[in-house]
Amino acid sequence: MGDGALQIDGLSKRYGDVVALRDMTFDVRAGELFGFVGSNGAGKTTTMRIVLGVLAADAGDVRYDGAPLTIDTRRRIGYMPEERGLYPKMRVGEQLEYLAQLHGMDAHTARIATRVWAERLDIAHRLDDDVQTLSLGNQQRAQLAAALVHDPVVLVLDEPFSGLDPIAVDVMSDVLRERAAAGVPTVFSSHQLDLVERLCDRVGIVAAGSIVAAGTVDELRAGGESILVVDAPGAPAGWADTLPGVLSTSRDATGRTEITLARGADDQPILRAALTTGPVREFAHRRPALSQLFREVVTQQAPAEPPQQQRRRRRAKPIQDTSRPGRHGTSGRNARA
Amino acid sequence: MTHDTTAAAATSPHPVRPAVAARIEAPVTPPGSSRVLWLIVRREVTTRVRSRVFKVMTPLFVVALILGISVDALFTGGTPRLTVGLLTTEAATADALTSAGAASDLDVRAVPVTGIADAERQVRDGTLDAAVTATGRTGLTVIVKHDLDDTSRAVLTAVARQQALDTQITNLGGDPALVNATIAGAGLRVNALDPKDPHTNSRIGLGVITGILIYISLMIFGPAVAQGVIEEKSSRVVELLLATVKPWQLMAGKVVGIGAVALLQLVLYAVVGVTLGVATGVLNLPASIAASSALWSILWFLLGFAIYALLFAAAGALVSRQEDAAGVTTPIIMVIVIPYVIGLATLPGNPHSGLLAVLSVIPVTAPLIMPMLIAAGTAPAWQITLAVLLSLATIAALVRVTGRVYAGAVRHGGSRIRLTEALRAR
C-alpha cells in the first residue's frame, strides 16, 4: 500500500483459557495521533506488545506501510512499554546512545540525537548521571527520550502520560503532536480521557480484547445519545416527558431541563414545545465528553452474552469505526473469525 | 458528566495531512547481527570494568599475588644460604665449606674475619650466620647467635669429618685427594621404570593454585551472568531491548561480554603470577611448564565459563527479582563447588587418583578438575583430548537448550517460571 500507516489486523491472543485479544483491528494513519482507550485488562498493552514483537500473536498481523513488520521494520518503532524500564546503573546519556545504536544509528548520529532529545525533554543536565539517581519524573522523560532517540517512523506508547507532572504533560503532548505532524503514525494508550480527547485525531475504544468504537471524537459522539439543555423558566414539570424521541428528562439546580434524546431524534419539536410554555433563554446541545462516551460504550459491552454474538451486535452499531468506510479485508476477517 | 465544549471544539476535525510526503527518511540502516552483538558485548564489558567491585578487586588481587610471591620468595625461595666467617688462618677451610655446601644444596659463603672479637660482633649483628673460630682434631668450633639450623649443622659437621679423615689418610701415608676422588666416584645408579617427575611437588602446587583461580573466577563471573539477566528483567529494560534485538543476541552478548572481562582478569593474574613465580624461583619449574599450564588453565576456564554461564543465564531468566536468584543458581553453584572441593582435597595427596581422572572427563566437573591435573602433570594426552571434546559437545548442546529456556522465559515478568513452561513457550 505504501501509505505509511500502521495497521493492526485481526490480532488474537489467548493465555490458556483467558482470551486477551479477539480480532483486534484498527489502523493508525501516517501523521495521525491515535488514542487507545479502554478499561484495565481490555487488551491495550497486549496489542502494543504484539506490535513490537515482544509477544507473539495467535492470529492476525501487523503491517507498516503495507508490509508485515519484520525485525528491521520493528527497529524503526519508538516504544514506551507500560512497565517502564532502563538500566538503573547506567548513565542516561550512554544508555540513550546505546539504545539508538541498537536501533541502527551509527555512534556519531546517536550522540547527536541523544543530545537533541535530552535538551528537548529537559534532562540534558542529567546525561552523566545513573538512571537510578533521577527523580521519577525525569526517569519518565528519559524513557520518552529512549522511545524517540532513534528517530522512529512509528510511535507506540503505553500510558506515556501516567506519572507526569503538568509541565511534563505539556512537553509530552507537544512532542507527540509534533511527531505526528512529521508524518509518524503515533498510537498511545491513556486513562486520561480529557487529554486523549484534546490531543488525538482519532480514538479507539477497546473492550474485552477488541475495538468497540473508533473514529474522531465527533464521529463517536454522532452515534450516541445526545443531551439537550433547555432553559424555559415558565415550563411546568414534566413538560417534555412525552415528546417524541425523548428518553428521559431531569431538572438541574438552576431549573434548566436536561433532556436525553434518542439517537438521531429531531430536536425541533422540542424547541417548539418549549416555546409554547413561555420564553426560552437557552437551548443547547451538550456535547458529551469522551469519558462519557467511553462509559456508555463500555457499559453496553457488559451484558453476559456469548462473546461471538456480542461482537456481531457491536459491528452492527453505527458508531463502529465510521471513519473507515470500505475497509479492505473486512469480510475476510469475519469469515476467519 | 463534564461539560467540555472548549476541549471538544479544539479537537481537530481530522486534519488532512500529506501522509506520504511527511514520511521521514532517517539516517538509519538495519544493523547486522554482528553489530548488535558487538554493541551488547561492549556494554557488558564497559559496565563490568567500570563497576566498583572490579576496579577495587582486580588491583587488590594483583597486589596480593605479588606480595604472596615475594613473601614466599623471602622465606623459602631460592637455595638456602649460609654466610660463614673464617679467621684468616683458616682460609683453607673455605673451599671445603663451599663444596660441602653445594652437595647439600646450601649456598655457603665464606667471609674472612680479622679475629674472634670481630667474628662475635658480626654474628651478633646478623651479618654472619656463623663463624668458624678454630679447627683441630676435635673438629670445628663455631660461633652462632642462637642456634645452628640442621642443614648448616650437617654441612659444617661434614667439613669437620672430612678434615679429620684427610689428616688420618695423610698420617697413614695416603693421598687424601685420591681417596676423596675414588669415594666421590663410587655411587648409586638408579634405573626407575616409571621415573618420577622431578618437579612433582611444584606442579601439584601449581595445580592447586590453578584450581583456586579458576574456581574464584567462575564463582564471581558465573553468578554475575544470572544477576545481569535478572537485572534486565527486574528493571523491565528487557522489554525495550527485545523490541529491537533477538533474545539469543541479548543472551550471547551477556555471556560473551562478562566472559571477556573474566578472561581479561584471569590472564592478568596468570601473567603476573607465572612471571613473578618463575623469576623469583618460588615456582621451581621451567618457564615452559608454567606457561603451558597457564595456557591450559585459560582454555579450561573458557570451556567452564561457557558451560556454567549458559546455565546461569537460563536460570536467571526464570526469575524476575534478585531475591529469587538463589533459588535457581544454587544448584549450579553446587556443581562448581563440589568438584572443586574434591579436587583440592585429593590432588596433593593422590595426584593419580582414579576419582579425579573420572571427574576430569565429565563435562560439568572437568573445567575445575582437568586444569588441576594438567598442572600437576598427571593427565595423559588422550584424557585431555577426550575431556575437551566432551566439553565442546556439551557447550553446543547447552547453547540450544539454554537459548530456548532463556527466550521462553525472559519476556515473562512476575513469579518464577517453571523450566518446562519456559521450554514450551514460544
Image: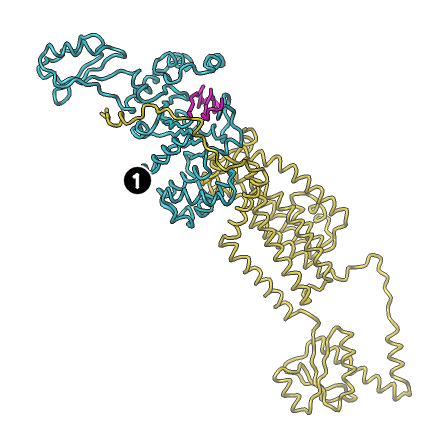
Q: Which chain is cyan?
A: A
Residue A71 percent across, percent down from the top left: 53, 31
Does residue B332 appear in this view? yes
Inspect the image, locate mark 1, and give the three-letter code of the amino acid beneath it. Answer: Ile
Whether residue A190 is situated above or below residue B190 in the rendered picture? above
In percent of width and height, residue A297 lies at 32, 19
Residue displayed at 76% across by 81% down: B97
Magenta-tinted stretch: A1-29
The colour scheme is by chain
Instruction: Measuring from the top left, give residue B370's x and y in whole percent.
Output: 69, 49
**Total numbered labels:** 1
Local packing at callout 1 (Cα closer than 10 Å; few below 14, some 14-19, many 20+) is few
Quarter where residue B116 is shown: bottom right
Please name the predominant secondary structure of the magenta segment in the image: strand
Question: Who is closer to the viewer here, A96 or B354?
Answer: A96
- Residue under the point 54% across and 44% down: B225
Which sits in the foreground, A183 or A207? A183
Q: Which residue is mark 1?
A: A167
Q: Is residue A24 magenta?
A: yes
Residue A78 vs residue B297, the one in the foreground: A78
Inspect this view and state whether residue B330 appears.
no
Q: Position of residue B394 (x, y in %)?
A: 66, 39
Question: Chain ID for label 1?
Answer: A
Q: Is residue B210 left or right of residue B2?
A: right
Chain B: give its colour: yellow
Instruction: Tell me if B311 is positioned left or right of A108 in this view.
Output: right
Q: Quadrant of residue B361?
A: top right
| Residue at screen point 76% across, 88% down | B91
Q: Secondary structure at mark 1?
A: helix
Residue A259 shown in magenta: no
